[in-house]
Amino acid sequence: MTRSLNERLGQAGIVVDEGDVPPVLEAPWFVRALQAFSGWLAALFLLGFIGMGAVFVLDSSAAAASLGLVMIAGAFALLRGSKGDFVEHLALAGSLAGQLLVAWALGAALGSVSAGFWWSLVGLQAVLALVMPSLTHRTFSAFAASLAFYLALTEGVSAPSLAGGLVLLSLTLLWLNEFRWPAHMRQLQALGYGLLLGLLAIQVMEYHGQSLLLGRYDYGTGLVWLEPWVGDGLATLALLLLVHHVFQRHRYAIAPSSRVAAYGAVAVLMLLSLQAHGLSQGALVVALGFAIGNRLIMGLGVMLLLLAITNYYYWLDATLLAKSVTLCLLGVLLLALRWVLRRRWQIDRRDAVGEDESQ
């Protein structure tokens, strides 16, 4: 193993040769949970003390924005200066309070909660997700940015499923390239988890017919004519990118017939998603977790898949018998596709190994 590779693995936090260095003992989960609770409790007392003496700043948007930015900068300095669960959660609570003050100032300056307000929050959360030296804060900021992005597109162009599809496409590209920059692998993973949790929250609200805009459901302008198929279209595009990535990674172990079968499965899944919206998104996240070997992503994908199936089952535009038959046929078809692809994959791998040995 070359020295350059050792250095790259070390930058990614992967220890190759520990030598005589004793292993680092991590605190048990209940100790870390207690430290996190202590951090939030201390932050609440501190913020309450500050709020009692600085409540007047809410009367001025400039003062509220200034205090909010100071609190965010203080959280950044605290995270840069020391490590630990107590400090991390204390800084996160302070940063959240500062973000609320900045949001209050933006709403007061704009005069209403419009698309411009949500786009401003998207920019703020994106910056925090990129610069904050805390994986927990990066995950939360990515989660908040995805929700603000959803609200901006819903308020501006009436396209909530477009927001979900773009978030799904972004997190797919992010997870497929998590090893491209070893030194920033953990930061990319934190962003990926935040976007995935944001997608899950968006889909929960959409499937239950609710809105994060406090009861404002009717729009009728902008890109409403794309709903709800644009989200499934972007999910299909992301699935095609995932299949292409897998084929490029195992280019010598997959026969052309298996490639055709895989693209055919994607086409069938796209057609099914036109009837059961959101099905392709859940299937994509499950396939993504399987492709990169991440069980947590697979679990979240299963949740998305179950939400999509449940939403279709309670869809009122079709009879219960028709939906039951459709879901039964869907399950049989997916199991058959899995069996065919798995069997063909094993045959192709044995043939590729045989060709390599003969050469």
Image (cartoon, helix red, strand yellow):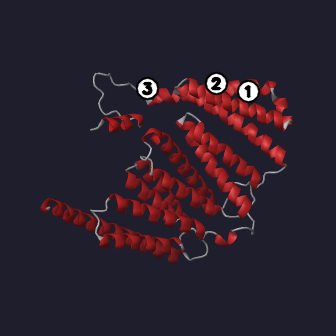
Disc 2 element: helix
Which residue occupies the foreground of this view, 287 or 331? Answer: 287
Residue drawn 67% across and 51% down? 148
Q: Which mark is residue 42?
A: 2
Can you give x and y, in whole percent of width and height, for residue 346 in the image? 24, 63
Residue drawn 78% across and 44% down? 106
Residue position marked by numbered label 1 in the rendering: 48
Residue drawn 48% across and 52% down? 300
- Mark 2: amino acid: Ala
* Of callouts 3 and 1, the N-terminal one: 3
Q: Which mark is residue 27?
A: 3
Distance between mark 3 and mark 1 Cα atoms: 30 Å
- Near mark 3 (Cα within 10 A), the count class, few <14, some 14-19 or many ≥20, is few
* Of callouts 1 and 2, the N-terminal one: 2
The correct choice, above or below, for 59 with respect to 77 in the image is: below
The correct choice, above or below, for 245 with respect to 184 in the image is: below
Residue drawn 55% across and 46% down? 194
* Of callouts 3 and 2, the N-terminal one: 3
Can you give x and y, in whole percent of width and height, for residue 304 in the image? 51, 58
Which residue occupies the foreground of this view, 230 or 18? Answer: 18
- Near mark 1 (Cα within 10 A), the count class, few <14, some 14-19 or many ≥20, is few
- Near mark 2 (Cα within 10 A), the count class, few <14, some 14-19 or many ≥20, is some
Q: Furthest residue to the right?
A: 59
Distance between mark 3 and mark 2 Cα atoms: 21 Å
- Mark 3: amino acid: Ala
Distance between mark 1 and mark 2 Cα atoms: 10 Å
Disc 1 element: helix
- Mark 1: amino acid: Gly
Can you give x and y, in whole percent of width and height, for residue 275 in the image? 54, 74
Q: Which quarter shows the C terminus?
A: bottom left
Disc 3 element: loop
